[in-house]
């Protein structure tokens, strides 16, 4: 048995309790040149960024240079702190993952899996818990089997198995109300929240004439994976284009905007910071002309599961989102990151979708997944005085094993978060047509997702492959930050505070 899979299986058997195990089995795909080259580019970039102290060094080269990119071109080699520039030197296929649908079907229909699932139905009264589900974007499947059957199932399919993970529970993020006097006199911005002023969203609207719609009039579509959204809130009416509710196995329970009532305040608050209007008399949303699709992957205080979030990412990509906001995460203490999220995030990037995730609220030297994955755009929180919020997470992580990166380049060391945004005393919408101020990296993350929507609305990335569109947008967001804390990236602010006005300005200067 593969040592990595063996360790994962041993950990599962040691740490899970009860008669049954709820697991995600991830399969090997045929050699994926796209994923291998993307991770290789990430290694080149991370090596360069480790000693970089100026975020401007991450900005992509002029568009004409990227379009003419060849491996021998010196100008792109000099842009080795820009991931989009490194990717421009490589030729990518249209899909990150080879088609593994047959492999998944064969696994689920195999005699040993079918028998194990049938046995579980004797113990589970809810059919949905026993019913297997496909997780195509990670080349995986979620199954519930007796713990005693798991080693045999993995052993039977060992040549095809890449990883085995618990379908872990994800707690709903804590909601911490804040008092208005937390802001002091500096928080009294006329007609808008302090977050919109500090991220330069208000200036962006005036300077570039967009609040989230592209030049052709189409709104940028942002997916919010969270609790439900109260689509009847005055600031959100008409802005939610689709809704889907996922159960703990990753299957869709119900769909349609009519079902988009909030199962908690969290999702509605996050949504308001992205697309909220000024029904309260002051603007609350970064990109009020953008549109949302909402996926319920956290059921109020019950929280959710890994399978729910992975399925939500897949749904967001196939539903046409350009940005995904995930103000959620599973707490991680270990510097070594080992989750099935990376395949899902890379699949999103290859389809041109930027994934923005909260880094977590458990303080320094902790992080949350998927925010701690290398390919997420991870967000920490600061207050109105540009001080890092004490709850904001961050640390250095290590990618020790990979099926795609050459062992000569491992371990890959990287730091999270990537950026910081307003996350203290953030005013936004809550169910029932009212407003509250919350603290959390959950509140910082939608500021960045909204900034991404403004960038995509104001800048023309057409003509670039979807993967290069997403990475170029990410590099402009990183390169436009206002550096806070230590010079360069640190574990508290990342590279600095988001400044969407500068990001768009730098993109325009480079003919995007």
Image (cartoon, rainbow, N blue to C red):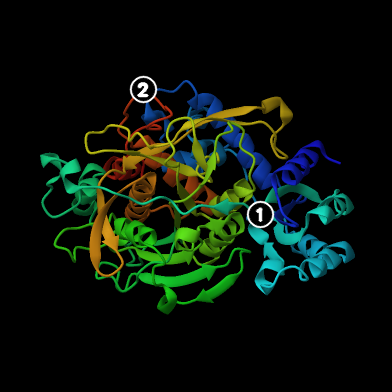
Residue 490 position in % (x across, y down): 42, 27
Residue 130 position in % (x across, y down): 71, 68
Q: Residue at x 19, y 42 (%)?
A: 182
Residue 65 visible in rendering: yes
Instruction: Categorize mark 1 by other alpha carbons within 10 Å: few (<14), some (14-19), many (20+).
Output: many
Which residue position holds label 2? 486
Query: Which of these two is toward me, 242 or 475?
Result: 242
Instruction: Farthest residue to the bottom: give it.
Output: 258
Residues at marks 1 and 2, CA–CA distance in whole angstroms: 36 Å
Does 91 sit above or below residue 251? above
Does 9 sit above or below residue 111? above
Quarter-of-image position of residue 246: bottom right
Quarter-of-image position of residue 7: top right
Query: Which of these two is toward me, 341 or 266?
Result: 266
Direction from residue 89 to residue 360 in the image, left or right: left
Q: Secondary structure at mark 2?
A: loop
Q: Residue at x 59, y 33 (%)?
A: 334
Q: Residue at x 38, y 51 (%)?
A: 449
Instruction: Kindly check if marks 1 and 2 are in contact, taking CB atoms under 8 A apart as contact.
Output: no
Q: Secondary structure at mark 1?
A: helix
Residue 307 position in % (x across, y down): 61, 58
Which residue position holds label 1? 138
Residue 465 visible in rendering: no
Direction from residue 348 to residue 383 in the image, left or right: left
Does 473 sit above or below residue 212? above
Does 234 sit above or below residue 176? below
Query: Which of these two is toward me, 198 or 115?
Result: 115
Instruction: Categorize mark 2 by other alpha carbons within 10 Å: few (<14), some (14-19), many (20+).
Output: some
Direction from residue 390 to residue 283 in the image, left or right: left
Mark 1 vs 2, N-terminal side: 1
């Amino acid at each position: 048995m593969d040592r990595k899979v063996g360790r994962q299986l041993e950990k599962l058997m040691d740490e899970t309790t009860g008669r049954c195990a709820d697991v995600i089995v991830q399969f090997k795909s045929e050699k994926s040149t796209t994923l291998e080259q993307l991770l290789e580019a990430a290694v080149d970039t991370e090596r360069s960024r480790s000693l970089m102290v100026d975020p401007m060094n991450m900005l992509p080269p002029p568009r004409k240079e990227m379009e003419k990119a060849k491996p021998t071109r010196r100008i792109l080699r000099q842009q080795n702190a820009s991931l989009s520039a490194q990717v421009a030197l490589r030729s990518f296929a249209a899909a990150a993952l080879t088609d593994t649908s047959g492999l998944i079907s064969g696994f689920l229909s195999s005699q040993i899996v079918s028998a194990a699932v049938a046995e579980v139905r004797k113990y589970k009264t809810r059919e949905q818990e026993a019913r297997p589900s496909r997780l195509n974007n990670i080349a995986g499947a979620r199954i519930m089997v007796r713990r005693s059957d798991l080693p045999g199932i993995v052993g039977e399919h060992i040549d095809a198995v890449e990883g085995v993970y618990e379908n872990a529970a994800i707690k709903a993020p804590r909601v911490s109300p804040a008092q208005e006097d937390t802001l002091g006199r500096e928080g009294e911005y006329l007609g808008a929240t302090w977050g919109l002023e500090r991220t330069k969203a208000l200036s962006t609207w005036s300077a570039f004439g967009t609040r989230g719609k592209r030049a052709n009039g189409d709104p940028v579509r942002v997916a919010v994976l969270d609790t439900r959204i109260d689509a009847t809130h005055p600031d959100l009416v008409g802005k939610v284009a689709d809704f889907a509710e996922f159960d703990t196995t990753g299957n869709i329970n119900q769909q349609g905007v009519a079902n988009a009532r909030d199962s908690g305040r969290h999702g509605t608050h996050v949504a308001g910071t992205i697309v909220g209007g000024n029904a309260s008399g002051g603007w609350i949303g970064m990109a009020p002309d953008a549109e949302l699709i909402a996926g319920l992957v956290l059921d109020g205080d019950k929280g959710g599961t890994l399978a729910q979030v992975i399925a939500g990412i897949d749904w967001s990509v196939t539903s046409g989102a350009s940005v995904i906001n995930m103000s959620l995460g599973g707490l991680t203490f270990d510097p070594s990151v080992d989750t099935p999220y990376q395949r899902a995030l890379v699949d999103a990037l290859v389809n041109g979708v930027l994934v923005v995730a909260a880094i977590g609220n458990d303080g320094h030297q902790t992080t949350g997944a998927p925010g701690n994955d290398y390919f997420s755009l991870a967000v920490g929180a600061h207050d109105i005085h540009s001080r890092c919020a004490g709850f904001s997470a961050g640390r250095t992580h290590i990618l020790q094993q990979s099926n795609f990166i050459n062992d000569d380049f491992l371990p890959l060391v990287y730091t999270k978060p990537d950026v910081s945004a307003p996350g203290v005393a953030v005013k936004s919408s809550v169910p029932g047509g009212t407003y509250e101020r919350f603290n959390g990296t959950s509140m910082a993350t939608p500021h960045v997702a909204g900034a991404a929507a403004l960038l995509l609305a104001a800048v023309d990335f057409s003509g670039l492959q979807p993967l290069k569109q997403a990475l170029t947008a990410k590099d402009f967001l990183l390169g436009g930050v206002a550096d806070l804390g230590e010079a360069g990236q640190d574990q508290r602010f990342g590279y600095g505070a988001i400044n969407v006005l500068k990001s768009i300005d730098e993109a325009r200067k480079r003919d995007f």
